[in-house]
């Protein structure tokens, strides 16, 4: 339960993230999020490096859940290895809701479709090499 609570805490941090940072060596990452419940709140996506994995995100953004897939552009501050975490705030309460044992009750996703086995995935399982503008897909579950 401790690991699941950590996942929820890190995803909760997405609500107030600024996304307007200006970095000299930014690399754009287009993120398509699939399996969205249309017209139910917002989809929130956070970018992490290895040192911040599931803690304080490097960058975060949100987009209205306007269709079954949504796409947003995240600016990584530099070339490197990053992981993505996302959730859909279906009830628009600004936080990731969980059941009585701490498991997220709203849809979540991680890069590389990294699984949540009794807790959040390891950074190594979710890590992406971001060296040039690119695209990736997250599937909410």
Image (tube, grey):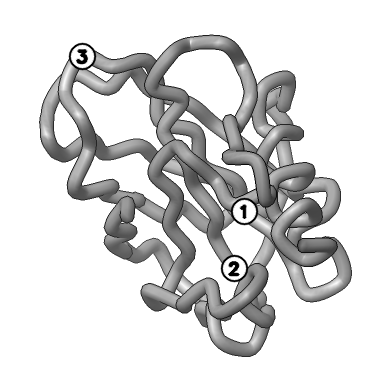
For numbered disc 1, what is the local secondary structure? strand
Residue 132 against residue 104 in the figure, above or below: below
Between residues 10 and 72, which one lies in front from this camera angle? Answer: 10
Which of discs 2 and 3 lies nearer the camera? The answer is: 3
82 on left or right of 90: right
Residue 110 % position (x, y): 48, 63
- Of the residues under marks 1 and 3, which one precedes in the sequence? 3
Residue 35 shows in the view: yes
Residue 70 % position (x, y): 23, 35
The residue located at (44%, 37%) in the rendering is 106
13 on left or right of 103: right
Q: Name the residue under label 2.
A: 83
30 on left or right of 92: left
Residue 44 % position (x, y): 49, 33
Residue 106 against residue 46 in the figure, above or below: above
Are the residues at dot 2 and dot 3 in contact (C-beta closer than 8 Å)?
no
The residue located at (27%, 22%) in the rendering is 65
Which of discs 1 and 3 lies nearer the camera? The answer is: 3
Between residues 131 and 127, which one lies in front from this camera angle? Answer: 127
Which quadrant holds residue 68? top left
Residue 123 % position (x, y): 67, 79
C-alpha gap between disc 1 and disc 3: 24 Å
- Of the residues under marks 2 and 1, which one precedes in the sequence? 1
Q: Name the residue under label 3.
A: 39
Which quadrant holds residue 36? top left
Are the residues at dot 2 and dot 1 in contact (C-beta closer than 8 Å)?
yes
Q: Residues within 10 Å of mark 2 (few under 14, many from 20)?
A: many
- Of the residues under marks 2 and 3, which one precedes in the sequence? 3
C-alpha gap between disc 2 and disc 1: 6 Å
Q: Residues within 10 Å of mark 1 (few under 14, many from 20)?
A: many
Q: Name the residue under label 1.
A: 47
């Amino acid at each position: 339960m401790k690991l699941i609570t950590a996942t929820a805490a890190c995803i909760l941090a997405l609500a107030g993230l600024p996304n307007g940072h200006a970095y000299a060596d930014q690399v754009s990452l287009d993120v398509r999020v699939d399996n969205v419940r249309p017209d139910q709140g917002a989809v929130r996506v956070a970018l992490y490096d290895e040192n911040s994995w599931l803690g304080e995100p490097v960058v975060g953004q949100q987009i209205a859940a306007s269709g079954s897939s949504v796409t947003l552009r995240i600016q990584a501050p530099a070339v490197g290895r990053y992981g993505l975490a996302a959730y859909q705030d279906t009830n628009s309460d600004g936080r990731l809701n969980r059941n009585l044992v701490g498991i997220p009750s709203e849809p979540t996703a991680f890069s590389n479709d990294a699984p949540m086995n009794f807790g959040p995935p390891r950074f190594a399982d979710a890590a992406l090499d971001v060296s040039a503008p690119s695209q990736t897909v997250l599937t909410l579950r």
